[in-house]
Image (cartoon, helix red, strand yellow):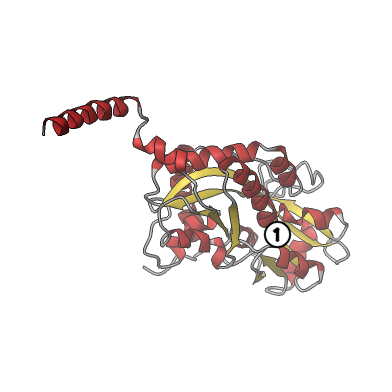
Amino acid sequence: MHRRQLLQGATGVLGAAALAIAPAAPAQTSAAFPTRPIRLVIAFPAGGPTDITMRQLAENASRVLGQQVIVENKPGAGGTLPAQQLQTAPADGYTLAQIPLGVFRLPYTTRINWDPVKDIHYVINVTGYAFGIVVPADGPIRNWNDFVAYARANPGRLSYGSTGTMTSPHLTTELVAQKLGIQLNHVPYKGSADLMQAVVGGHVMAAADSTGFAPQVEAGKLRVLNTWGEQRLAKFPDAPTLKELGLDVVQNSPFGIGAPRGTPPDVVKRLHAAFKTAMEDPAYVQVLNRYDMLPNYMSSEDYARFAQDTFTREKALVEKLGLAKPG
């Protein structure tokens, strides 16, 4: 008994000493994470600008984390499927999702049982889309005035494609049409790759999209009628902004990476640090540049604030277009 008491006492002293010098439990968890591959679900199909740029980011992050970050494509539903998938995924950091802007308008247009602000842990914002409208270079529409004139003369006959119903390209184009008093024929596609094939092939007369259309413009197949930022894009200096065309509309679309609600803070911190490093890799900056995209870093805290502000702002757009779900 005496020997056992001595051992217990020694263990207690050693245990207390170990606790005094050991890092806190969350730091130990961070050091261990990840121990297996991580899945990053993105909202658009393979081959488009989102897929290509996010695969480069994932490759860079894999090197930092020491585990593979595997990109999984989940297109459809206006880019909201990855965020919905987070609602049933374990909150362990091994399932991540791209969060496009459409996620923040989802509760206003669809009945869902989760909250885009409270039920996603916002890890990091990485970049964003710039948008514009393009037409076939060999088609009859040569500029924005031609586009509007045709639409006025042919109500509902000017067809344009977007990357999906309720996406930013769709809603912004409808807002523009509303302001101009014209009626367009919207044709949704699952992503930029399919949309570009459609407009180049003459299946639609125009396309509203992110600047994923850049390679087709550079190849002389498409013409840019306008872009939607505060200023003209360096890659398309001849294309006027909507504001220059007399429309008080500015639309950019930052996006980043979210994790399930309840993901341990130390795991989020580790993921944030890894993806921030991945963003700074020249290979990522270079692939973004192909599509006139730029790194757009927001910390976890800033990204969460952006989510709240955007959620409030998107309600006004949905209501203005008369697309809010019935009460």
Q: Which residue is at a point 56% across and 43% down the rendered structure image?
A: 65
- x 78%, y 58%: residue: 145
Classify the position of the N terminus by image quarter. Answer: top left
Q: Which residue is mark 1?
A: 48
* Percent coordinates x, y for residue 228 in the rendering: 67, 49
Where is residue 34 drawn, in percent x and y? 49, 46
Image quarter of the C terminus: bottom left
Q: Provide the secondary structure element on which disc 1 rests.
A: loop
Nearer to us in this view, 19 or 105 = 19
Task: Measuring from the top left, give residue 275's x and y in whole percent.
Answer: 57, 42
Instruction: Return the residue nearer the eye: 49 or 8.
Output: 8
Q: Is residue 4 shown above or below 214? A: above
Query: For residue 234, what is the image quadrant?
Result: top right
In percent of the image, x 64 and y 68: which residue is there? Answer: 190
Q: Quadrant of residue 114?
A: bottom left
x then y, percent, for residue 231: 70, 41
Q: Is the residue 245 above or below the residue 191 in the image?
A: above
